[in-house]
Amino acid sequence: MKNMAEELFKDFREHSVSEFFRKNAAMLGYTGKIRSLTTVIHEGVTNAIDAAEETGVLPKIVVIIKRVNDEPEHFRVIVEDNASGIPEEFIPNVFGKMLAGTKLHRYMQSRGQQGIGVSGSVMFGQITSGKPATVITSTGNGEIIHADVMIDVDRNEGKITNVEKHKGKWRGTRVEVEVKDVTYMRSRYGPFNYLRMTAIANPHVHVTFVEPDGTITILEPATDKVPERPKSMPLHPWGIMSDDLLILAKHTKSRNVVSFLSAELSRVSKRKAEEVCKLANIPLNKKPSGLTWEEAERIVSAFKQVKLYAPPTSGLRPIGAADIESGMRQILNPEFVHAINRPPKVYRGGLPFIVEAGIAYGGSAGKTTGNEEGEAGMELIRFANRAPLIFDQGGCAITTAMRNIDWRRYGVDPTTAQLTLFVNVVSAYVPYTSAGKQSIADEPEVLDEIRTAIMEVAREVRKFLYRKIKIKERQERAGVFEQYLPIIAQKAARLASLKEPDIKPLLKKVSGVDNAEEES
Ligand SMILES: Nc1ncnc2c1ncn2[C@@H]1O[C@H](COP(=O)(O)OP(=O)(O)OP(=O)(O)O)[C@@H](O)[C@H]1O
Ligand SMILES: [Mg+2]
């Protein structure tokens, strides 16, 4: 009789990571005709801003969406930056290899963290249009490279199908991806709104956007400061597990466990490391590569018994209250705006994060610009490390926190309020719920901080709305006086056979609205 297992296991195969994401493109955000197009823009724009900031220049981004052959669902998407450029030998891996990049192994805030963003959009272009992506890049060495790149899905490798070089003075990168089966719309989920949100959270970025019908929109920067580059932060012992420790031990250059712990972890001095080794009963001169699982577990629990400084936040770069306010002012032109910046906190025991919030009233706040649906009411705009989160709103900690607040206590009816609420969560490692990076997981500490931040700005809006109501009441009262006082004065003077008094100063006094603010 045939062996069943042998029969079944004849089909046992290995899958490359590219093959996996080719079949599961939805996991990277390629789902739906509008969302897929916005995802291509998102991947290009986050890379462009990350690269410009790392180069230390003010990001100047050009985004162009062109129709191809006048077909309704066929576009060429172009994202250009003025950043470092990409060295020729890295082009295949940047655009054609998934899970590869300069940001995944370090512990520092950036928009990208997975090494799959741009290769994902090259893949999406390839599977919908059959065309390679075109990359034009120069590191500023006088040579401009023009390369067509495709992904070899079986090997998870980039293949350059055509390359040309010419001389020219320019530095930056221009990525062009041709995509089919997508729709361009100026809706809340479309590229226009995505870029508008990018501008709010990145007031130092200059964006030029060309829509398929040729409309050009320029989003001017509200500041000319490049955010300071965050520093890479080692892991902190509070957030570490035995497995993390053993992986670090495998790659360290340190020769003994004491110097290993102090070199690879933050807030651990040599003395602290010795104290921990003694508590964990590990010889101080033990080679890190020789650590066993049990020893690693003992070290992790010994760290819980010693006093340590809280994790550093040098790897975090929040936007800052003043810049959030200028970003919101620039884009929403509101009557009132207020932003706050919470102090750093940690989640899962050791991963630092900061929450920032802003609120704007009036102007175009509360309405999604370019919104064809004409929706009204309070608008929530979510960000992680300054990158807009547009999709998967329902499953995000920011949405949960906003919904858990009783807005009536702040004088706000969320269904009609002309308010835009802004929340940005920054961390060297954002706890996203999926590879599509569009919503933040409900980590209790993160959720709590977001809620506190929203309540802080909501209190300011309550004060503002109260003042506004007071001023309106006064104006109405003054209107009544203005209408009747002159008549009363005239009649009273006639009755008393007196000269009609000059009531203008009196009118001015009762209609004065200047002191309404003091009353609030
Ligand atoms: N415009 C650019 N200029 C310079 N380098 C770039 C640019 N775009 C991408 N890179 C490099 O290519 C790498 C891969 O980019 P990719 O978008 O795939 O991943 P990531 O940005 O690291 O992470 P994520 O998957 O979260 O976006 C980046 O880490 C960066 O080193
Ligand atoms: Mg990226």
Image: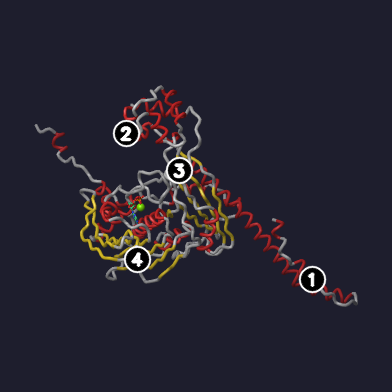
Name the residue type under label 2.
Answer: Lys
Q: Are marks 4 and 2 in contact (CB under 8 Å)?
A: no
Give residue 162's position: percent from left, percent from top. 21, 61
Q: CA distance from mark 3 to mark 1?
A: 60 Å
Q: Are marks 2 and 1 in contact (CB under 8 Å)?
A: no
Name the residue type under label 4.
Answer: Ile
Q: Residue at label 1?
A: 505
Q: Residues within 10 Å of mark 2 (few under 14, many from 20)?
A: few
For discs 3 and 1, the disc positioned in front in the rendered view:
1
Q: Residue at label 3?
A: 442
Looking at the picture, the colour scheme in use is: secondary structure
Looking at the image, which residue sits at the far front?
141
Which residue lies at the image location 45% right of the left edge and 45% below the top edge?
315
Q: CA distance from mark 3 to mark 2?
A: 32 Å
Q: CA distance from mark 4 to mark 3?
A: 35 Å
* SS for dot 3: loop
Q: Nearer the viewer, residue 125 or 234?
A: 234
Tell me where residue 195 sits by quadrant.
bottom left
Q: Nearer the viewer, residue 104 or 56?
A: 56
